[in-house]
Amino acid sequence: MAIAELGVVVLDCPDPRALAGFYAAVLGGTVEGDSDWADLKIPGGPALAFQAAPGLVPPKWPAPDASQQFHLDLTVQDLDAAEASVLELGAKPLDADDRSRGWRVYADPAGHPFCLCAC
């Protein structure tokens, strides 16, 4: 028997509504909340939450001497089309040069790493 049930994954960031808006544009859903906390309600999927952390120091990636802390794997049908969309929304490529792999790594506007993964 499980002790707990996962409620939500929370990302620290300087501007919760802005980062929730970025992920809403990528994943769909609606943003609720204020300047200190925002929830992204994703239809048929898990929610994400965003918490104000004005002094956030984004993880370094890749950095063998520093942890990336966590990352999100986002499954997509078309890597090239998804890449163009997330870059237009403000993502930064971290390791997207290798086109032979089925995944590419980016940082969201607050600096959290995430991967686009071909399904």
Image (cartoon, grey):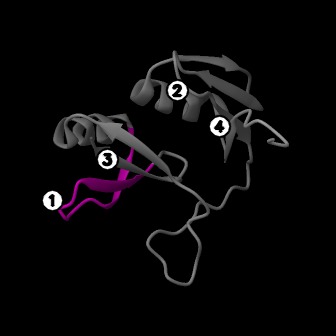
- Give the foreground label among 1 and 4: 1
Going from N to C along the chain, the mark reached first, 1 or 3, is 1
Q: Which residue is mark 2?
A: 21
Real-space Cα separation, disc 4 to disc 2, in angstroms = 10 Å
The amino acid type found where label 3 is placed reads Cys
Going from N to C along the chain, the mark reached first, 4 or 2, is 4
Q: How many marks?
A: 4
User: Which stretch did the figure color magenta?
Assistant: 90-107
The amino acid type found where label 2 is placed reads Gly
Going from N to C along the chain, the mark reached first, 1 or 4, is 4
At 44% across and 20% down in the image, what residue appears?
28
Going from N to C along the chain, the mark reached first, 2 or 1, is 2
The amino acid type found where label 4 is placed reads Asp
Task: Tell me which corner region of the image, top left, top right, bottom left or bottom right, holds residue 81.
Answer: top left
User: Could you tell me residue 36's position as x and y percent?
Assistant: 77, 32
Q: Which residue is mark 4?
A: 15
Q: Are marks 3 and 2 in contact (CB under 8 Å)?
A: no
